[in-house]
């Protein structure tokens, strides 16, 4: 109570025409499962009983002396900015249930979604009623992991009013260099190049900032940066590569550029893709038989523990 809660406006790996909300608890995690029963009740009751039910729950659960805040972020979909403004207006109008109801109706007309779908999938009414934000903070275009970090770190360090999205980028860069130092005793330039498919999404904005911090240690080539000419997740992104088992559109053309200027040859590079809000990451490569080999979460965990096992053996510690 009295802490920040996050609202991330994104449809994640879904097509660009979709949109939705992700709610982030004060701990920096997704909405706690204890709210599910309330959301289920809201979904299954008649529309004309919803506001009275939520008002009752608000009286039961809220701390009227606390002054919590909502952090609002969004991805780069063309309608996310409008969606964000509607959410912020609703947060600022918390004192009036009539205005909240108007907000939901207007929201449905604007992004063509059903009121019950919003409640069921995102529990936006629960967030608006129970967290009573005054006033919301708009972080603009950020990734979902960025929002998780901002909420958690802001609450832990009591920096709710002064949190800045740039702190996440600095934290990523610092942590990477610390890991590199542990691996090589001192930060050194990593051989080869990493090509990252940004899914035409908001991850491209943040990764450009990360690249500037790590330029002396890791060569990163970004493709499918956000652009008005390309749709989010269209023929690219982590979902496209993993589910369709296809390379991102345009990746093969980089091989020809590499032959000409000797800078980028995708077959000799490490490859990675994120999704539209940058909370999914996969690595992959094309083997000598021209077959796509994907390193999903399970394989990445195996590689991680293999690395940890090597370090443990170097300390002569026993694993039993």
Image: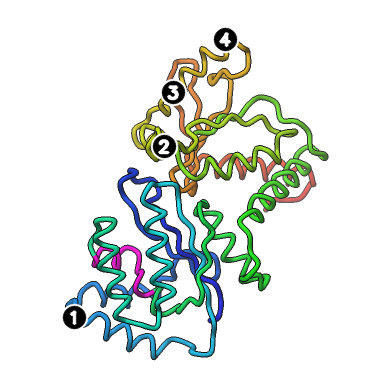
Q: Is residue 102 magenta?
A: no
Inspect this view and state whether residue 302 appears: yes
Which numbered marker is on residue 228?
A: 2
Seen in the image, is 261 located left or right of residue 62?
A: right
Residue 167 percent location from the top left of the image: 66, 56
Q: Point out residue 239 in the picture as x, y percentages from the top left corner.
A: 39, 40
Residue behind mark 1: 48
Classify residue 82 as left or right of residue 101: right
Gap in angstroms between the C-alphas marked 2 and 4: 29 Å
In whole angstroms, how far apart are the C-alphas of marks 4 and 3?
16 Å
**Marks 3 and 2, the one that precedes in the sequence:** 2
Label 2 crowd (10 A; few <14 / some 14-19 / many >=20): few
Q: Name the residue under label 4.
A: 259
Which residue appears farthest toward the top when viewing the image? 260
Q: Answer yes or no: do the residues labelled 3 and 2 have beta carbons within 8 Å?
A: no
The residue segment tinted magenta is 115-126
Q: How far apart are marks 3 and 2 (CA)?
A: 17 Å
Task: Find the residue positioned furthest to the right.
Answer: 186
Q: Mark 3 near mark 1, Cβ–Cβ under 8 Å?
A: no
Q: Does the image show residue 241?
A: no
Q: Marks 1 and 4: which is nearer the front? A: 1
Which circle marks residue 319 in the picture? none
User: Residue 221: x percent and y percent?
Assistant: 59, 29
Which badge, 1 or 4, comes first in the chain's sequence?
A: 1
């Amino acid at each position: 109570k009295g802490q920040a809660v996050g609202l991330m406006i994104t449809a994640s790996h879904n097509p660009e025409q979709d949109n939705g909300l992700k709610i982030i608890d004060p701990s920096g995690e997704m909405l706690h499962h204890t709210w599910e029963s309330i959301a289920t009740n809201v979904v299954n009751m008649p529309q004309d009983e919803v506001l009275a039910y939520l008002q009752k729950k608000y009286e039961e659960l809220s701390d009227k002396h606390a002054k919590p805040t909502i952090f609002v972020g969004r991805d780069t979909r063309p309608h996310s900015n409008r969606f964000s403004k509607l959410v912020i207006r609703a947060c600022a109008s918390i004192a009036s249930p009539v205005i909240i109801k108007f907000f939901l109706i207007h929201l449905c007309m604007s992004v063509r979604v059903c009121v019950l779908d919003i409640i069921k999938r995102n529990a936006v009414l629960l967030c608006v009623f129970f967290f009573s934000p005054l006033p919301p903070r708009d972080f603009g275009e950020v990734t979902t992991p960025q929002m998780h970090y901002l909420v958690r770190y802001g609450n832990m360090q009591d920096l709710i009013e002064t949190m800045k999205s740039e702190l996440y980028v600095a934290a990523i860069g610092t942590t990477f260099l610390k890991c590199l130092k542990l691996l090589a005793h001192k930060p050194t330039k990593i051989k080869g190049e990493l090509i990252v498919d940004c899914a035409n999404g908001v991850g491209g904005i943040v990764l450009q900032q990360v690249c500037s911090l790590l330029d002396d240690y890791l060569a990163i080539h970004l493709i499918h940066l956000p652009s008005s000419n390309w749709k989010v997740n269209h023929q690219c992104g982590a979902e496209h590569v993993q589910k369709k088992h296809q390379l991102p559109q345009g990746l093969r053309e980089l091989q020809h550029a590499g032959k000409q200027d000797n800078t980028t040859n995708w077959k000799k590079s490490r490859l990675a893709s994120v999704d539209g809000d940058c909370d999914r990451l996969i690595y992959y490569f094309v083997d000598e038989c021209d077959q796509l080999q994907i390193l999903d979460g399970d394989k990445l965990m195996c590689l991680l523990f293999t690395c940890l096992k090597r370090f443990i053996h170097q300390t002569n510690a026993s694993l039993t």
